[in-house]
Amino acid sequence: MEANTARRVLRGIAFAGIPFGAAMAIPVFFFSGGMPALVGGVIAGGLFGVGITLFAEYQRRRMECRGGVFEGEAIVFQGPANHFRNREGRGGWLVLTKRRLAFRSHGSNFQNEPVDLAIEDVSGVSPERTLGLVPNGLRVDLHDGKREKFVVTDRRRWIDDLSGLVGGEKGGEKGGEESGNREPVPTDP
């Protein structure tokens, strides 16, 4: 297993498995009490963390664009993402090229339509908190007043790269053209 994959598995166990294990331990504690709750929570959490991370790795390998090209365009940045359409958080893959921001669903969603946002249609990019709590959201505002929301990893990189292509706009504020002159992006909206 390569180092990045191992790190992602450990991160999945920490950020998915441990919270799930704690949530499982609470009801078991009240019904059976003591040590069975702790052991059951740890086992359930660990298995959930490994399972969800293996699923994410499978999807990553299946969807990642190899060779630095997406539909004939050079890739600036890419990664796993969720896109919100109506009330569904659709899992898939987000790709940024110099011409567009493209989302492709992994196909296990109710709504699997692709999203293609031309860079010239983007008016601003800003961080967002998913469910008002988790600092992993990315909001893309369009000139026509519409807004697209994504959940991403490495949100800072998405904002920096997309803002650079849009012309230095970040959350409606203009920054310099060079990365050294850009205003810092706030960590939460």
Image (spheres, rainbow, N blue to C red):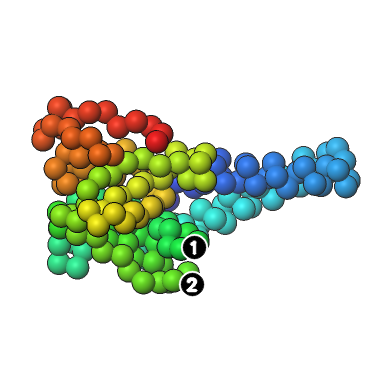
Q: Residue 18 at x, y = what percent?
A: 62, 41
What kind of residue is marked 2?
Answer: Phe
At a point 16% along the width and 46% down the height, the residue shown is 165
Question: In screen coordinates, is 54 left or right of 69?
Answer: right
Checking the image for residue 66, the label placed there is none
Q: Residue 9 at x, y = what percent?
A: 49, 47
Q: Outermost residue, front direction?
A: 145
Q: Outermost residue, left direction?
A: 177
At a point 86% along the width and 43% down the height, the residue shown is 30
Decide: is 50 above or below 116.
above
Q: Are marks 1 and 2 in contact (CB under 8 Å)?
A: yes
Q: Which residue is mark 1?
A: 88
- At label 1, counting other C-alpha atoms closer than 10 Å, the crowd grade (few under 14, some 14-19, many 20 or more) is few
Q: Which residue is mark 2?
A: 110
Question: In screen coordinates, is 117 left or right of 135?
Answer: left
Residue 3 in view here: no
At a point 52% along the width and 46% down the height, the residue shown is 131
- At label 2, counting other C-alpha atoms closer than 10 Å, the crowd grade (few under 14, some 14-19, many 20 or more) is few
Q: Residue 149 at x, y = what percent?
A: 38, 52
The span from disc 1 to disc 2 (Cα, nearest Å) is 8 Å
